[in-house]
Amino acid sequence: AVIEKGAIIVPGVCCEAHACIGIKCVTCWGLHIKEHTMMGPNCHFFSQPHKRTISGKYVFRGFEDHKPIYIGPDCWIGYNVVVTGGVSIFEGCTIGASAVVTKDIPPFSLAAGNPAIVKKHYDAPDGYYD
């Protein structure tokens, strides 16, 4: 694995062979990055959201339970992407720059936006996007 300059790696991160954590990326507990996955600079991964009241006041009440994040093999995570807890990004996906990923992304998909949605699917045998 390659860890670029300024990346913050916390305990509980698993980064497999030939994967890359980009410049100034921030990782979280429970982040699992499979082989041959790369990411651009300034990506952020958050597995533990804050607890808050429902009275309309945002009063800090500690943290919720950790929700692991899985990133499959052969993925590309673009610049400044945010991935929230409990999300899986499956094999062969591309995530566009500045996307906010709040839900699972199926294999061989291109997702972008805030929140990220699937824009295209990649046909692996043919080698083209739909």
Image (cartoon, helix red, strand yellow):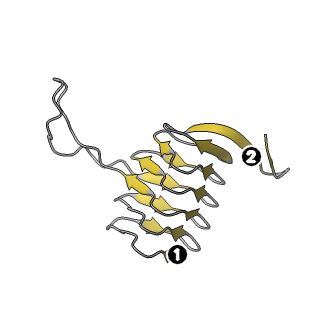
Give the label on residue 46, or none.
none
Name the residue located 65 percent from the left edge and 45 percent from the top edge.
110
Crowding near the residue tagged with mark 2, few <14, some 14–19, many ≥20 C-alpha atoms within 10 Å:
some
Extreme-top residue of the structure? 55
Identify which residue, 35 or 111, lies in the foreground: 111
**Which residue is disc 1 drawn over?**
1
In the rendered image of this protein, does residue 8 appear above or below residue 79?
below
**Which residue is disc 2 drawn over?**
122
Name the residue located 63 percent from the left edge and 53 percent from the top edge.
91
Identify which residue, 63 or 129, lies in the foreground: 129
Taking the image as shown, residue 35 lies to the left or right of residue 44, namely: right
Residue 84 at x, y percent in the picture: 41, 46
Tag 2 secondary structure = strand
Marker count (numbered): 2
Viewer can see residue 9:
yes
Q: CA distance from mark 2 to mark 1?
A: 26 Å
Amino acid type, residue under disc 1 in the picture: Ala
Taking the image as shown, residue 129 lies to the left or right of residue 23, namely: right
Name the residue located 39 percent from the left edge and 73 percent from the top edge.
6
Residue 8 at x, y percent in the picture: 36, 68
